[in-house]
Image (cartoon, rainbow, N blue to C red):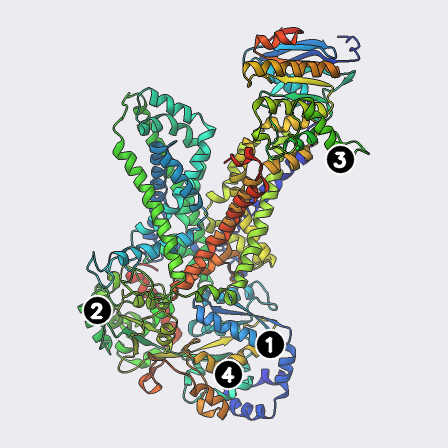
Amino acid sequence: MARRPALLQRALPSVVILILIAGPVGLGLAATLLPAFGYLPALGGSAVSLDPFRAALSEPGIARSLALSLGTGLAATAVSLAIVALFTAAWFETRVFRAMTRFLSPLLSVPHAAAAIGLAFVIAPSGLIVRLLSPWATGLDRPPDLLIIHDPLGLTMTAGLIAKEVPFLFLMTLAALPQTEARRHMRIASNLGYGRIAGFFKVALPQIYPQIRLPILAVLAYGTSVVDVARILGPTIPAPLAPRIIDWMADADPALRLQASAGAVVQLLLSIGAILIWRFGEILFSRIARSGWSSGRRHLRDRLMRHSAAAFVGVLIAAMVAALATLVLWSLTAGWWFPQAFPSALTLRHWTGLYSSGSQLIADTLLIALPAALVAIALIVWQLELWSRTGPRRSRTAFRRLMFLPLLVPQISFLFGLQVLFLVAGWDGTLVAVALTHLVFVLPYVFLALSDPWDHLDPRLAKVAASLGASQNRILWSIRLPMLLRPLIVAAAIGFAVSIGQYLPTLMIGAGRIATITTESVVLASGGSRSVAAVYALLQLLLPLLGFLLASVVPAIAFRHRLGLRLQR
Amino acid sequence: MSLKRVMPIAAALALTATLAQAQSAKDPSWDDVTAAARGQTVYFHAWGGEPRINAYIDWAASEVKDRYGVTVKHVKVTDTAGTVTQIVAEKTAGRITGGTVDLVWINGENFNTLKSQGLLAEPGWAQTLPNWAYVDVEGKPTVLSDFTVPTDGQESPWGMAKLVFMHDSSRLAEPPHSLDALAAYAADHPGRVTYPQPPNFYGSTFLKQILISKIDDRSKQEQPVNPDRFDQDVAPLFAYLDQIHPNLWRKAEAFPANAAAMRQLLADGELDIAFTFNPGDASSAIANGELPDTVRSFVLDGGTIGNTHFVAIPFNSSVKEGAKVLANFLLSPEAQARKQDPAVWGDPTVLKISSLPESERARFEAIDLGIATLGPEDLGPTLPEPHPSWVAAIEKAWAARYGGS
Amino acid sequence: MADPPPSPSGLKLDHVEINLETRRLVTLDRRIAPGDVLTVMGDSGSGKSSLLDFIAGFLDPAFRATGQVWLDGTEITTLPPQERKVGLMFQAPLLFPHMSVGENLLFGLNKIKGRDNGQRRAIAEDALRDVGLAGFFDRDPATLSGGQQTRVALMRLLLAEPGALLLDEPFSSLDQTRRADLRNLVFSKAREQGLPVLLVTHDPDDAEAAGGDVVRL
């Protein structure tokens, strides 16, 4: 028997990581609940009552706000999942699939706000599409008065969410596939004469779905409580619940702060409600699907469906690419009037202006994102290495579930209380407080990014090394970490990108003192200079891109003579 | 400083003259202020949605750093109300020194909140600033009366604002010069007119402009809202809105978020008319390539709403001296002239140009106001803002009537 | 039960029993003398790999194992894998892909005071020459054939100076002719260095070539 580390040593990384994640979420939720019931001595509220809830629920149009939050969240999640499932079913293990995978993965690093800003530039009535078609095809020399952005039903906002969530769910599905027998079972289904899509839905999806349920619920929780995308694309009269809560919080009237806390609790209930509705849908869907398993129908004629799945994903990729291209154009524009399809003059002024106005922002962004990413990597490596040493443990499943906690609880619901706690501690508006809050969201993504490659490392390599007399630490530093150099840098880049993309945590915990390129670009998105907004939206993308560039360049240089590693994906 | 604290607030006006004289003799207490300010770091909370204004504040910060050794950090807020909440929270949390806000760009309702709750630095400090001597107290009475609330020297004027409309002359040669003409224009050209969504400041200002023009008795607005009569008083306002809403941009089912977004829509050709609170806005946007050079400014017959915007020091700032040095610099002829230049910002000065020394006056005369800026004689009368209580009341009524915020 | 004193040399498996839940996978009580080969044969799932894992110190906690393992008179059952001095060879050569061929060998070579880097490299190059791979020191392992890689893996193992060899079907990935060559190489090296060998395989040819006792699981 190998010697086992002592219990404390074994549990320490889990404890540290869980404190860093569950601590802020749990304490934050508690600190949100008290003011929601009227108790906030700092603002003179000491009587426990339901008044804040009454006030929140009697705001004009609140029922519609609740319906919007619920509807857009559920619709975005369902459509995203449908696209991902159909596309995977139709094209898995084909050239099309590989090509689209290559496009979808980098899209994951585009922050929500940047994607929404770019999409708005493309689909607005005065946006790129109408410009490209005008006046020669549309006959328009003025933009049509069409309600596309901020539409009252939130359709555009839903589309914006879908564009961002499809790449996420897609990559989660890709990660889940090798953990199941889906690949082989799909071949058996084909061999038995089933069409691709039917084979996937009858054989593979039931195996994959449990693996991606948590990511799906995270998408759902996010969609029902999103603020930045709602601000940029969503309806405004009334807005969905989450942005309204932020407005109440920013109001000069302190009583509205209690109301905002109550709103944050309502938001939590709403997201839980959405998850329950989803769960009900799961049961319903699996009943229907189950009856299909034994029907024997092969559904061989799925050509149309297969091609429409590819078309969906193609449109999505095209929209995102167009969004990014439009951002680039606007960032270089010195005058671009409707219906010109191209700016009338180009300038680098908006970029050079960054030197004076943006350097502090960029510095703060990096001072938060770099430590957050590096600390997350260190902690997750510590945890994974410990698991490698002690062998597989049952607690690991529980650990993975807990990692999803901050992604399942609506941000606004616990950030609200967390802000109060940091204020009481006198830490509000410090880089450390913001970085700690970012860590809550960075850790899960780093864990998701790193645990698969870590587990897929051939365990026999470590056994060989150990039987050669290498110590555990030597195995870590000379075998595991060098072999995992690329996934390590990718995971760090993902963590870095997640931190940069954080809008609400920065806004709320930064207390206005800390601004990052993301908070700045949301402010600028509704401002007067589309060019400057574009510059900041692009910066949100360029910084993480540098990380991903490192992830491909560094291992390529370090292992330029190592064919065995270059062939790895 | 103790002398100033006991100074009767009502004598603030009289103080102006005294200080103007004292200033020429180098008021020793101001030297104390600048000495104490050296090395301080001032957190200046100012709306950060406009890159040109941000660049101007950056410039002011670096000048103050070079000249007085005061470090200025611009905290870019999205909504000044948030800063007000922060100060209120600090007060109730018992943080009476070391507040997070040292200077805040403010006026109207937000100023009234802070002033009425005693959350501002001592009255009269604004008049102790050496550059107060040049402020145009007679010509611009709103520098002392912020939305009818007396400033009592608790905020220092920074710039002037006046509701000014913009139109693209290549599409709309003769703009409507009254609210009724505007409604008629919207009826003829559906979807080309709108206003920012209240409670955005500009949207609320547009509502106030309508209220002032349509209310039966203008004197009512100098008083706080009378809840009993409120519905009657605002009936003409909402009658007007009900009339134009179906003809507005997106049939009033969506609104631009703020004036800058509305200006962007004008640039995109979605709108024919936009408005701003800064008479120089159109010219500077043209200079920046954000508006076509065919855009021109206009005002309504009978005048438009105007006010002054200020900077104020919260009660719990620990670097009040540094904040005063910054406020004084912002009020200097040099900074004010630069601010008025449309190539920089285009925000009108609060100073009386004729009272300036020759060399300082030349700074203003050298400014090219730009093709789209109305001269002082064309700006028309300035209508005073109603009492701050009206703003919240009509915003609330608006939200209730048109479906939330 | 009174244990007889274990034999001082070789690999002794003393009443080893491995269970998974209620299923008994392995029972073995044997001594392998230096230079001898014990072949364990069995179908997949029969617990062959668990036996090797138990001896080398990698047994998954899900398994329950009793009995002791002795190597040259020392009980190693409770030692960490690093200190057991039992060398493992798997089906695949498992060269570390991020290291050169030479670095793989040096990874195996023990650090001894007074031996400088030049001397270490010379030892590694000798080892390569020994198995007909002279001049391969700086090569990328991925560019070597399967047989060449297995030879490097063997030398890497031997440079670590193990007290026993555990072979987990190390020849199954090779074609027939290479398989015979490598079998001979491995067994002759083991005999040369007096190492007890435990060979796990399902190939009767392997068992025959090993020449020692055969146990079926």
Q: Which residue is mark 4?
A: B334
Helix, strand or loop under label 4: helix
Disc 2 or disc 1, which is closer to the eye? 1
**Along the line of sight, the residue nearer the viewer: B383 or C62:** C62
Helix, strand or loop under label 2: helix
Q: Give me the C-alpha separation between circle 2 and circle 3.
A: 90 Å
Q: Residues within 10 Å of mark 2 (few under 14, many from 20)?
A: many
Label 2 amino acid?
Answer: Ala
Q: Earlier in the sequence, mark 2 or mark 4?
A: 2
Which numbered circle lies on residue B66?
Answer: 1
Same chain for mark 2 and mark 3? The answer is no
Q: Residues within 10 Å of mark 1 (few under 14, many from 20)?
A: few
Q: Which residue is mark 3?
A: C118
Q: Give me the C-alpha separation between circle 3 and circle 4.
A: 74 Å
Label 1 amino acid?
Answer: Asp
Helix, strand or loop under label 1: helix
